[in-house]
Amino acid sequence: MRNKESKTTPKKALSLRSQISNEVKAELPKLHSKYFNKFKGRHNFINKFIYVPDLINGGDADDLKSFMISAGEVSQNVSTKTIQYDLIDFALDKLMQLKFQYFFQDNDSGLCSTAWLHEIDGEWIVKKVDAFDDR
């Protein structure tokens, strides 16, 4: 009986991970697009998340304050009742299209991972969901 339980548990875990991945692939592009459109342009959005400390002139903690506020706004606006998202990176791909990396965590199961969101022909698509970690 114990062997049967251990065999079904990985299947249920796999099913849960697939379900979470599918939800992220469906919802994250919509949430990101809605939040991204608030800024009326790429440069306005990107400028909110660029933090370059002025180490030579003795950088001030107030410089970090606006970056932290922006990060908090993303967390509030790009999340659902079941999944919490945090923007952790953005870059340009080979075609000079924006791509974003979001850390996400399922509130119920505690499973977490990262998802890569790419802009392809003006549309946001989750191209990759990394392996899950159940911290």
Image (spheres, helix red, strand yellow):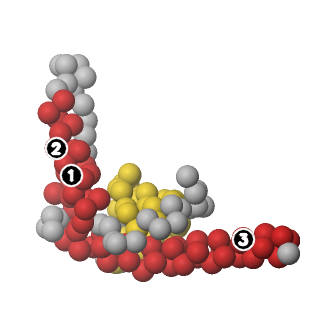
Q: Amino acid at mark 1?
A: Ser
Tags 3 and 2 in contact by the CB under 8 Å rule? no
- Inter-mark Cα distance, 3 to 2: 43 Å
* Label 3 secondary element: helix
Q: Amino acid at mark 3?
A: Pro
- Inter-mark Cα distance, 2 to 1: 6 Å
Residue 36 — which label?
none
Confirm whether residue 116 shows in the render. no
Q: Residue at x 40, y 71 (%)?
A: 82
Quadrant position of residue 125? bottom left
Q: Height in image: 87 above or below 56?
A: below
Q: Which residue is mark 3?
A: 10
- The residue most toward the front is 1
Confirm whether residue 73 shows in the render. yes
Tags 3 and 1 in contact by the CB under 8 Å rule? no
* Label 2 secondary element: helix
Q: Residue at x 26, y 51 (%)?
A: 71
- Give residue 127's position: percent from left, percent from top: 49, 70
From the viewer's perspective, is 87 left or right of 45? right
In front: 6, or 102? 6
Residue 70 — which label?
1
Q: Residue at x 29, y 66 (%)?
A: 78
- Inter-mark Cα distance, 3 to 1: 38 Å
Tags 2 and 1 in contact by the CB under 8 Å rule? yes
Quadrant position of residue 40? bottom left
Q: Height in image: 100 above or below 54?
A: below
Q: Which residue is mark 2?
A: 66
Neighbour class for label 3 at 10 Å: few (<14), some, many (≥20)?
few
Which of the two discs, 3 and 1, labels the residue nearer the N terminus? 3
In front: 95, or 71? 71
